[in-house]
């Protein structure tokens, strides 16, 4: 009885650890995706800002 209990406990523990690591991986993927989506718009706005400054100095 004791053996099966510890085995089950080990199993649930590893299962929980797996779930946690999966969640961490998922959150990292979500952050990466968000960065990938955000980066072009940030670069675009930066370009727009620099072109505006160039136009101002040009005039």
Image: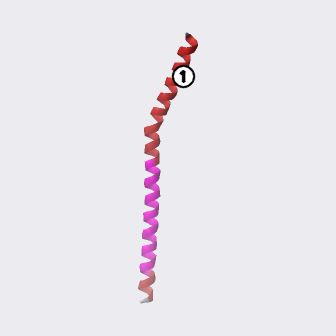
Quadrant the N terminus occupies: bottom left
Residue drawn 52% across and 28% down? 46
Q: Residue furthest top?
A: 59
Residue on which disc 1 sits: 50
Instruction: Tell me which secondary structure the magenta stretch mostly adopts.
Output: helix
Q: Quadrant of residue 50?
A: top right
Quadrant the C terminus occupies: top right
Is residue 53 positioned above or below 35 on the image?
above
* Front-most of residues 59 and 42: 59
> Whole-percent x and y of residue 17?
46, 67
Q: Secondary structure at mark 1?
A: helix
Q: Is residue 10 left or right of residue 53?
A: left
Is residue 1 part of the magenta span, yes or no?
A: no
* Front-most of residues 15 and 49: 49
Give the residues in magenta: 7-30
Is residue 26 part of the magenta span, yes or no?
A: yes
Residue drawn 43% across and 49% down? 30
Is residue 16 positioned above or below 55 on the image?
below
Q: Residue furthest right?
A: 57
Is residue 38 positioned above or below 27 on the image?
above
Is residue 9 positioned above or below 41 on the image?
below
Residue drawn 45% across and 53% down? 27
Residue density around tag 1, few if under 14, some if 14–19, many if 20 or more, within 10 Å: few
> Whole-percent x and y of residue 53?
56, 19
* Front-most of residues 47 and 6: 47
């Amino acid at each position: 009885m004791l053996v099966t209990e510890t085995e089950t406990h080990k199993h649930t523990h590893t299962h929980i650890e797996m779930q946690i690591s999966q969640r961490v991986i998922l959150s990292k993927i979500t952050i990466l995706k968000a960065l990938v989506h955000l980066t072009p718009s940030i670069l675009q706005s930066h370009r727009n800002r620099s072109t505006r400054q160039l136009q101002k100095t040009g005039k």
